Image (spheres, rainbow, N blue to C red):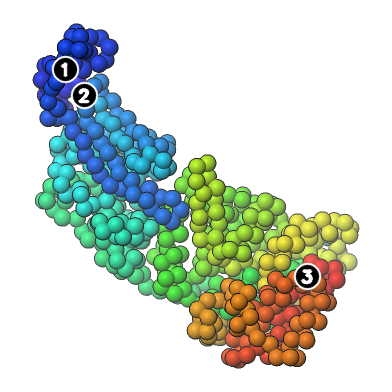
Amino acid sequence: MASPALGQADCPPDLSQARIARNGRPRLAVSCLPVLPPCPTMSLAIVRSRALIGLSAPEVQVEVHVGRGLPAFHIVGLPEAAVRESRERVRAALVHRGFDFPNRRLTVNLAPADLPKDSGRFDLPIAIGVLAASGQLPSEPLAELELVGELSLTGELRPIRGGLPMAVAVSAAGRRLVLPAQSASEAAVFPEVNALAANHLGEVCLHLLGQSPLARVEHRLPAAAVWTGSDFSDVRGQLQARRMLEIAAAGGHSALMVGPPGAGKSMLATRIASILPPLSSAESLEVASVHALAASFNPSHWGRRPVRAPHHSASAAALVGGGAGPRPGEISLAHHGVLFLDELAEFSRPVLEALREPLETGRITLARANRSIDLPARFQLVAAMNPCSCGHLGDPRCRCSIEQVVRYQRRVSGPLIDRLDLLLTVQRLGEHDLLERTPVESSESIRARVEAAWARQHQRQGDANARLDAQGVARHCGLGPESHALIVAASQRLRWSARGVHRALRVARTIADLAGSAGIGREHLAEAIAYRRSPLDPGSNGP
Ligand SMILES: [Zn+2]
């Protein structure tokens, strides 16, 4: 260590005595202390970094003060456990890289203090701050930089979450981000990226010393992902369910299939991934930002709509988001894509209730002790469930009583069903269907129709039909007199609210778009109405 304990060798002897005086063991009366110049080795360095609050990355100033006093290392400014542990990583990494760890009183202040700081991404700015404050690195080059990165005990930089939202925020602030090389690929998808990638602490130090500049992160988009998974051509029969999923994919509609086990509900639903329209570049960037926040960014999924299928035992926090940070849940990871919930009735009631708000608004607000955090969650819900707990309702095998059936179906509340656009009862396949040898349409050919319908609605209104608001419905879903009479009759017979009528009209708009029709015809509306009868309503054609 270059600096002896307590810094006595570097400071004038009077100052050393003054310190002892303030520690409460006076050798001199405080009133007769001389006014002394600041000790040249006492220093302050300021390094900029970023916190992560949802998708926003507010600036954090890491102020490092090396002062006199008993050797200590304090971090203040609302740090969470992972940041407090930063002390040990920073100390080990600096020593391992051959730097002096100042044997003095180190105070690190993360400002502003009211911003919660989680994760080890402050390791790098703290380490660089310690080096700058103790005169081992120049502090001038730090003015135009912002640093993030977790350190290993040997000084390697570990990847961080949220590299993309931070790259966006730092670029807007007109500065340059230094981040771990393993997080560079997600920052690179941002067109105006201004960042440098480093593998270990030593590289950052050499850059600041002007000896070896860090590699620039160049803007680069990953190749658009091509679907190579399961295909609709593997599924026999179930023409109506296939058609419903095509409509769902084409208009971004949410859908529910009710049917016995073995009817192929999950097999059909998971194949919706193969016919979804590609993401636009703006949507791709949003999806990548949310996944970067969850540390699940994968360049090989670029441009493809995410499909998430959480298990029914998932907690409300896993589904809507939570924990430290907080982390995005499944509904945010399914942003601009599909959330598939198999065995819908088996999900806990709080989980299902938590879906209602985001289904309507496309966002989720997570309340935290001192702030609320907004995350995007514009997902399309595709769900499947059995009609009763044994699954064989309507079949002699079913032993469920009426009360049991009602109780089972009521697990999925009416308000949730009311928020779904497409509802369908799926029957088990007969032997005839299984032996059917006529070729089945492939996902590729269905996707061509879906993409054409998608392009049509985006050209017309700039958004998916499922997202049309009341004015949009009035504007783009006009009906002829015959169709008008049809929807009035249907809404009276099926006891629809105004919301139900709008849902039928949006679906009819998508069916017309799939047919390449400028207006909604009677046949389009009739098909849409058929998908609005609840399979769980005893008065409908359901089980
Ligand atoms: Zn049953």
The answer to which of marks 3 and 1 sits earlier in the sequence is: 1
Q: Marks 1 and 2, how far apart in space?
A: 9 Å
Residue 150's place in the image compared with 312, above or below, is above
User: Which residue is label 3 attached to?
Assistant: 535
Disc assigned to residue 68 = 2
For ligand 1, give the image quadrant.
bottom right
Please provide percent x and percent y for residue 102: 20, 30
Residue 103's place in the image compared with 364, above or below, is above
Where disc 2 sits, the SS reads loop
Q: Residues within 10 Å of mark 3 (few under 14, many from 20)?
A: many
User: Which residue is label 1 attached to?
Assistant: 16
Q: In front of the other: label 3 or label 1? A: 1
Q: Is residue 35 left or right of residue 285?
A: left
Residue at position x 14%, y 36% from top?
A: 135
Where disc 1 sits, the SS reads helix
Q: Quadrant of residue 155?
A: top left
> Assess mark 1: CB under 8 A from ligand 1?
no
Q: Are marks 1 and 2 in contact (CB under 8 Å)?
A: yes
In terms of depth relative to the viewer, which is nearer, 301 or 232? 301
Residue type highlighted by circle 1 = Ser
> Assess mark 2: CB under 8 A from ligand 1?
no
Q: Quadrant of residue 174?
A: bottom left
